[in-house]
């Protein structure tokens, strides 16, 4: 990939005022894209604030000779998402890629989670990814091209404590991405997911115990800039044959993550009863049960 990889393309990056989104927006512009920098300027938990971080990112892009425009609409709102896409089309005349990165956290142990904790996180992550994608879909269909890149997480792919809302939203995004890839493939529209490992203010807000301090220190070395190249690649023509996939990125490591598939099967010609399931099926498949592990259990080695 070179400095003109995204030349002529228009990209929307949501949640692009800070962290991973900011790094992606800057790299997109460095590779020739015209960028809509979307950020509602909210806090980690979604509370409205006075900051406008999108303006700073736009300024940096323009200082380096790129083209960008800021947008402060919320992805969680149907009309707001449509305005984000309209900003791209009205300003630059088209839209070629959407990076669904915006997110908030409301972490709590499940039995303490409120309805608002649940709904707020799903509205931004899952509904937001749908809203912006749907707003761009008609443009992609008309021009017979386009790329979606959605952010998922090992909190959903593997598991984590105190993140039922976040994990559910991130697993929902997998289903959304795969469905888009299937439904819009005929129009040369692609859809993929990235599961990023990177230190950000969202990660920094997750409650941690004393025995996790060493892990947190290592996590801080995982910068958002290591995620951006994969997002740029997936949005570019170099990834024209890549769709419906899940990539995890951890510093210099890139993983291809599998989709759930059957791993064992059993049958009885006469059918099953609760008793035969307990006596026959359970002992046969129990050794193949997925362990109740967390992301840190699976990715247990230091990042390269």
Image (cartoon, rainbow, N blue to C red):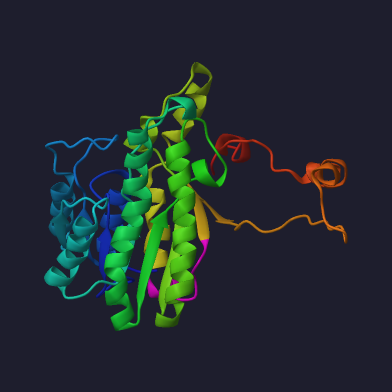
Residue 294 lies in quadrant? top right
Residue at (43, 25) in percent of width and height: 112
* Residue 74 relative to residue 284: left or right: left
Residue closest to the eye, 15 or 216: 15
Magenta includes 182?
no
The N terminus sits in image quarter: bottom left
Residue at (51, 28) in percent of width and height: 215
* Residue 270 relative to residue 204: left or right: right
Residue 47 lies in quadrant? top left
Residue extent of the magenta highlight: 236-245
Residue at (69, 43) in percent of width and height: 290
* Residue 54 relative to residue 187: left or right: left
Tell me if residue 149 comes above or below residue 144 in the rendering.
Answer: above
The C terminus sits in image quarter: top right
Can the viewer see residue 194 in this picture? no
Total numbered circles = 0
Residue closest to the eye, 120 or 275: 275
Tell me if residue 128 comes above or below residue 48 in the rendering.
Answer: below
Tell me where residue 32 appears, x and y as whole percent: 25, 68
Residue closest to the eye, 123 or 46: 123
Tell me where residue 145 appears, x and y as whole percent: 35, 78
Can the viewer see residue 93 in this picture? yes
Residue at (34, 71) in percent of width and height: 5
Residue closest to the eye, 240 or 272: 272
Q: Main secondary structure of the magenta part?
A: loop
Tell me where residue 61 appears, x and y as whole percent: 18, 57
Tell me if residue 37 comes above or below residue 41 in the rendering.
Answer: below
* Residue 200 relative to residue 250: left or right: left
Tell me where residue 81 appears, x and y as whole percent: 23, 58
Residue 51 lies in quadrant? top left
């Amino acid at each position: 990939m070179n400095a003109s990889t995204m030349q002529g393309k228009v990209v929307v990056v949501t949640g692009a005022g800070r962290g991973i989104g900011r790094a992606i927006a800057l790299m997109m512009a460095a590779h020739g894209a015209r960028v809509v920098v979307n950020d509602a300027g909210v806090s980690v938990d979604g509370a409205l604030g006075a900051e406008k971080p999108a303006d700073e990112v736009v300024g940096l892009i323009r200082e380096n000779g790129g083209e960008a425009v800021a947008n402060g609409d919320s992805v969680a709102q149907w009309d707001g998402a449509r305005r984000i896409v309209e900003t791209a089309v009205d300003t630059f005349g088209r839209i070629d890629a959407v990076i669904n990165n915006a997110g908030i956290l409301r972490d709590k142990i499940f039995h303490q989670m409120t309805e608002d904790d649940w709904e707020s996180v799903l509205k931004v992550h899952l509904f937001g990814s749908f809203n912006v994608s749907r707003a761009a879909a008609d443009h992609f269909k008309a021009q017979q091209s386009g790329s979606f890149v959605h952010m998922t997480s090992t909190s959903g792919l593997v598991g984590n404590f105190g993140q039922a809302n976040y994990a559910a939203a991130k697993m929902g995004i997998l289903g959304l991405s795969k469905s888009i890839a299937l439904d819009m493939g005929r129009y040369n529209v692609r859809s993929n997911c990235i599961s990023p490992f990177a230190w950000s203010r969202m990660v920094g807000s997750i409650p941690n115990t004393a025995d996790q301090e060493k892990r947190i220190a290592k996590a801080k070395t995982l910068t958002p800039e290591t995620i951006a190249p994969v997002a740029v690649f997936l949005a570019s023509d170099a990834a024209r044959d890549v769709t419906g996939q899940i990539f995890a990125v951890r510093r210099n490591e890139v993983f291809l993550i599998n989709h759930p598939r059957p791993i064992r099967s059993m049958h009885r010609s006469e059918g099953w009863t609760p008793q035969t399931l307990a006596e026959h099926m359970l002992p046969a498949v129990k050794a193949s049960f997925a362990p109740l592990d967390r992301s840190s259990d699976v990715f247990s080695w230091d990042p390269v």
